[in-house]
Amino acid sequence: MAKRIETVGLKAWFGAFLVLDGISLTIEAKQVTALIGPSGCGKSTFIRTLNRLHEVVPKARTEGTILLDGLDIHDPAVDPTALRRDVGMVFQRPNPFPTMSIRDNVGAGLRLNGVRKRGDLDDAVERSLRLAGLWDEVSNRLGRPGASLSGGQQQRLCIARAVAVEPDVLLMDEPCSALDPISTLAIEDLIVELKDQYTIVVVTHNMQQAARVSDVTAFFNIGGAGQPGRLVEVGRTSKMFTNPDDPSTEAYITGRFG
């Protein structure tokens, strides 16, 4: 079930370096929220805080509150591994498990969750590959290595793997940056289709992509070299791309800086 995310006064550090400063942002369920902004403004760090991947980095830490449908994800009762099943992640470069088959790539998370019956696994694999728009292309070669697929197919395989465990939120960190235009279009179409079931957050440097796929856009920026990222403004994508409130948002979107 898609869930709402809310961050309140979120700060993030790598060691002594403050990367994000006071991010308060609400991400609504069953919408696509695009995060845009220049390199180094903390967009990728921000989404990695949402499933506590940030804290895996040595000496990385956060302050502030992150709520998943009202539940504080830093509550001691929250298991980070379980959280990462509920808040899935698709990375910039496709990362299928190279020694695993297509079938086993999709089913890996399910097996970790205790699903053992072959019939249940097969049904979930087919459902997930259909959701990812990949079933028709791979149904007759599920036993082949995931790494044998093209780059765009590998990224859709990674999306299938993420949705197989039925997460509440899907985080995507520049999921199309390593893909050709045709594969990019396939991923964009998939993002729009998946929002009916998931809360989706997409980091992108592609302004046209943000405009095409997102309902809401959040613009992050930095005040200057060595300064932390901050949230400048957030709003409906249609407004952000035609009549933003902050001049720096308009400058970035129109390519005058960044």
Image: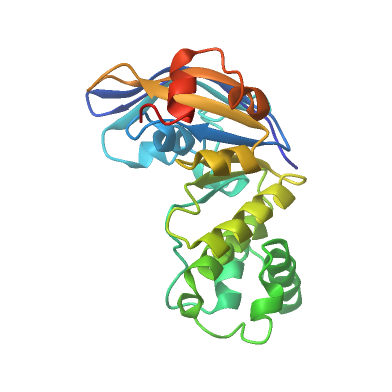
Give left or right: position of 226 versus 36. Answer: left
Residue 189 location, x and y as percent?
67, 54
Scheme of image coloration = rainbow
Determine whether 64 is above or below 118 in the image: above
Residue 83 location, x and y as percent?
56, 42
The tally of labels here is 0
Residue at 47% in and 47% down: 174
Give left or right: position of 36 versus 222. Answer: right
Please name whichever residue, 248 or 40, is drawn nearer the observer in this view of the structure.
Answer: 248
Determine whether 193 is above or below 134 in the image: above
Residue 22 location, x and y as percent?
43, 15
- Can residue 9 be seen in this snapshot? no
Residue at 44% in and 63% down: 95
- Image quadrant where residue 234 sits: top right
- Image quadrant where residue 11 sits: top left
Quadrant where the C terminus lies?
top left
- Can residue 224 be seen in this snapshot? yes
Residue at 67% in and 43% down: 168
Please name whichever residue, 71 or 150, is drawn nearer the observer in this view of the structure.
Answer: 150
Residue at 43% in and 30% down: 37
Please name whichever residue, 223 or 100, is drawn nearer the observer in this view of the structure.
Answer: 223
Determine whether 52 is above or below 108 in the image: above
Quadrant where the N terminus lies?
top right
Residue 244 location, x and y as percent?
57, 18
